[in-house]
Amino acid sequence: MSTIRRAAILLATAAISAAIPAIAHAQQAEGEAPRPARPRGEIPDREIIVTARSLASDNTNSPLPVQILAGDELAHRRQGGLGETLAGLPGVHLDSFGGGASRPVIRGQTVPRIEILSDGANLFDVSSVSPDHAITTDPLLLDAIELQRGPAAVRYGGNAMNGAVNLIDSKVPKAIPAGGVSGATELRYGTGDQERTLVGRVTAGVGQFAVHAEGAHRTAGNYNVPKSFGTDELRDSFADNTTYSLGASWIPDKGYIGAAYTHMASEYGLPGHSHQNGVCHTHGLDLHCEAHDQFDDPFGSSDDHTAFIRLRSERADLRADYDDLLQGLSHIRLRGSYTDYRHDEIDGPALFSRYTNQVWDGRLELTHRPLFGFTGTLGVQYTHGTFSGINVSDAHVPVAPNQFGYVRSTPDYITRNIGIFLSERRSFGNLDLEVAARKDWRRIDIPLPQWLEPFTDDTRAILVVLDNMYGGPGAYQRQMATIFNRNNPPSRHNPFSASFGAIWRIDDTYSLALSLARTERPAGVRELYAYGNNLATNSYEIGLANTRRLSSSLPLGRTDVMETTQSLDLTLRKTGGPLEFEIGLFYQDIDDYIFARLIEAELESGLQHNLLVYTAADARFAGVDGQISYSLTPQSRLTLFGDYVDTRLKDQNDNLPRIPPGRLGARYEHTAGPLSGDVEYTRTFAQNTIASYETCTPGYNLLNATLSYRVNMGNTGPAEIYLRATNLLNELAFVHTSFVKNQSPMRGRSVAVGMRYSW
């Protein structure tokens, strides 16, 4: 589909959405009287109203654990990346790559098995392709984060098989601010990395229209680490980021329609990165890391340069929510977006790799009124994306004069996906039941890249000879096209996911929730088509479709692999009263679980480089997570929390890699008038159950504390001054879930000093 056609579809959707209020008003004139109008009042800064259009109608009425991070807790926990911000919540660990890239690990798995959402719409970047790729969100600009532990694929596709993270922001205004104008600002300084942060936002409204502007700038140097690591700061762990958004909405009585533009520019270092294995190549199943013959070292320089990523992401969002559009419908929700993402990977003077991702996405949800006692939502989603970048680590090497053909071209991977989903819910007294299903049709095509014509007399003569060998003019190009298509076969998947949930409200405080789900996730682009060095993970990777290209002794290449997960989740909750808790048990039986299996480890260069082949095998995940809190007084609360994941790789003489260890923690919170604070201690245990190419990771202790003072500024709004201290014990800690755990330990002792003010 052409860009013009897709743009026309998006504009047409916007036009239809703009007509929604007029249609609704016309129907009200002809039919029943309208329901009382929803007031367009003030939405307090840094708060969220969780509705049925979020991950759950509320965090006590979901078959799965849903946790909401908002307000002061979010403001104090925020870091430069999403993974660091969420790490430490029950069931959530960290996959880190220095100070610039971090991904949340939920119940032992991260992207692409969890979905990152922006106000209920999929977020598109390339974070699922490699761990050094950042998630394109700035936690400094978020109002709240909703976190669902457990399968969310029935609404958001197979990539949400293990959980979903919904990022709530205000870039598209949903209400007119009280008094016509509202805003907030924040300043922060961090001692551990010389962080300097400035955040600002403002929303203004008149009549039924509102506009919004927000921005954040954060710059941080290399962060401190305990001296027992051998140095007092981690080289190349710096991170600079600037994000801004502009949005506007029309907000009639029963909903809103609006749009926003967001620009993000980031530059961050890659600690532990080395290009000395850029020469690694294969001879069958033998990984060889020395230059010879046609296998040249693409860098050919010292390895003491700074390696970093320069990222730029632009996104346009269209959002609409409207009540009582048509008779029988209680709500309609529209989400549309276009993302233009690019980042360059640079090592000293060499721009050795470039990733791009351009995605159009549209989502429409219709919620019907009660029908035979059931309420539910029917939705449809369409996604079209063009991605490129994998298998290239020599983009800086110029094309040789004697090269021609399909050489030095990075192919595009074009993904088209159509999904439909339905969820229905009904209450039978104290028992709530929910059923949901989703069907997708996904295809990935890899068109031929640009053909490089010979540009010397000698190479043109060679091409003539080759054409004659293969049957005449153009025959050699056709032969090379056949080889390219054989090495890059298309992929077709039609995944289906379904779930059943039940909540038994035992009384006003206790409830027991059960969720059963069957989820299908098709293999991703890297899992299918990888064939080459990934310098971020010090590995040479072979995708599922390219196994025979590596060696005839490997199984036939496959593009039809579908992870199929059967899961059971049991959640016991108590809300209200001094004692509250939520404990979740989960079990997952997964057929054709896709993981990278070690074939050979090569040490010729002095730095281990692994030959990894993506493999589908059966696996099992099981575990427990949750928290228990007790209010000692109305002003103080004690919370105990923890999580544990156990995995087994069936029929394989190995373990799954990067599985988080068990963890226990306690937090004490106290408030005394305008002064509040908390102290949190966490014990992360050692991880000794490891994959064949991993090493054991020792356990560690973390002690964090927060102190804040709120100042009443009268009618203009409150101000807050806070201190947030992390790793007060300055303990050297390695994160087992990180690809570069030994090169990139956790931050040492640091104190962030900040001031927030809203008006």
Image (cartoon, rainbow, N blue to C red):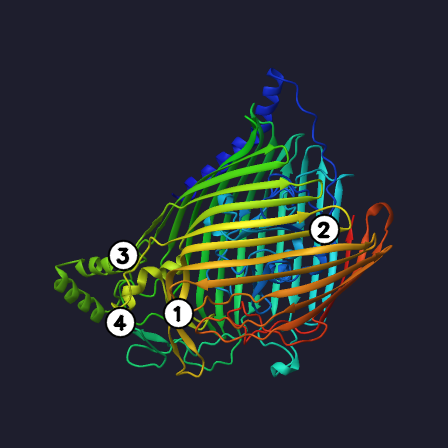
Q: Of the residues shown, which amino acid type is indicated by label 2?
A: Glu
For the residue pair 15 and 361, the one nearer the viewer reads as: 361
Q: Residue at x 51, y 43 (%)?
A: 155
Q: Earlier in the sequence, mark 4 or mark 1?
A: 4
- Label 2 belongs to which residue? 580
- Element type at marker 1? loop
User: Crowdedness of circle 3 by 10 Å Cα count: few (<14), some, many (20+)?
Assistant: some
Residue 459 in which image quadrant: bottom left
Q: In this view, does 481 lie to the left or right of 384?
A: left
Tag 3 near tag 1, CB within 8 Å: no
- Element type at marker 2? strand
Rounded to the nearest angstrom, the CA distance separating label 3 from label 1 is 34 Å
Is 519 drawn above or below residue 227 in the view shown?
above
- Label 3 belongs to which residue? 485
Is 58 drawn above or below residue 304 in the view shown?
above
Rounded to the nearest angstrom, the CA distance separating label 2 from label 3 is 58 Å
Give the total of numbered labels: 4
- Label 1 belongs to which residue? 653
- Element type at marker 4? loop
Q: Which residue is drawn at 29% across and 77% down?
A: 294
Rounded to the nearest angstrom, the CA distance separating label 4 from label 1 is 47 Å
* Residue 339 position in % (x across, y down): 50, 50
Q: Earlier in the sequence, mark 3 or mark 1?
A: 3
On residue 402, the disc is 4
